[in-house]
Amino acid sequence: MSGVIRLVIVVLAINGFFTYIGLFLLPQAESHPPKEVKIEEGITVEELIEIGKNIVFGKGQCMVCHPVKEETGMRAPAISTIGALMEREAKERGIPFEEHVFEALVAPGNYVSEGFANIMPPVHKPPIGLTKEEIVAVAAYLQSNGSKVTITFPESLKILEEVLKKTGG
């Protein structure tokens, strides 16, 4: 019986030791919900671009498929040159640049860049669920990667709403 008691004491001591290490010696990770960002009238284009960048690299989950720079085996166009690509595609389609960018976000299956599969979900619906304001910010950020930014807030909201009506979003 004394062997069993010793074994229980050893097991409790080992568990206590590792509990102490886990609680007091290892760094504790803390996770917080994303900060709510206010996108309102008077925001500068630079602020809009920065907010869009934070959404692309965070809440938008864009980097799951889009690499930062071009690489072999890409599943989606590279973020670093996507503005130039979208501007060229808009010209080829004969539609305004802003309209093409918004359509690529809310109805990505309507026009898929050559060489890529139709795998992107609409960003305004689950699982991503961006607000209209966030979509405008993301669009401004995308334009800033290789092209001139023509998207502003709140003016571009009208274009987004037209695209949503046209695409059934």
Image (cartoon, rainbow, N blue to C red):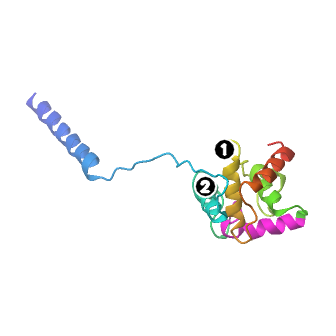
Are discs 1 and 2 less than 8 Å apart at CB?
A: no
- In primary-sequence order, the first of circles 1 and 2 is 2
Of 135 and 109, nearer the camera is 135
Vertical position of residue 74 compared to residue 5: above or below = below
Vertical position of residue 89 compared to residue 126: above or below = below
Residue at the extreme left of the image, as rendered: 2
Q: Which amino acid does label 1 sit on?
A: Gly
Q: Mark 1 to mark 2: distance in Å?
A: 11 Å
Residue at the extreme top of the image, as rendered: 1
Quarter of the image for residue 77 reads: bottom right
Q: Name the residue under label 1.
A: 129
Q: Name the residue under label 2.
A: 55
Q: Looking at the rendered structure, which numbered label has been put on residue 79?
A: none
Residue 24: x, y in percent?
Answer: 25, 49
Tag 2, which secondary structure? helix
Residue at 60% across, 58% down:
51
Quarter of the image for residue 101 reads: bottom right
Residue 7: x, y in percent?
Answer: 16, 36
Of 6 and 19, nearer the camera is 19
Q: Does the magenta stretch include residue 81?
A: yes
Q: Does the magenta stretch include residue 123?
A: no
Of 130 and 27, nearer the camera is 130
Residue at 55% across, 47% down:
36
Q: Which amino acid does label 2 sit on?
A: Ile
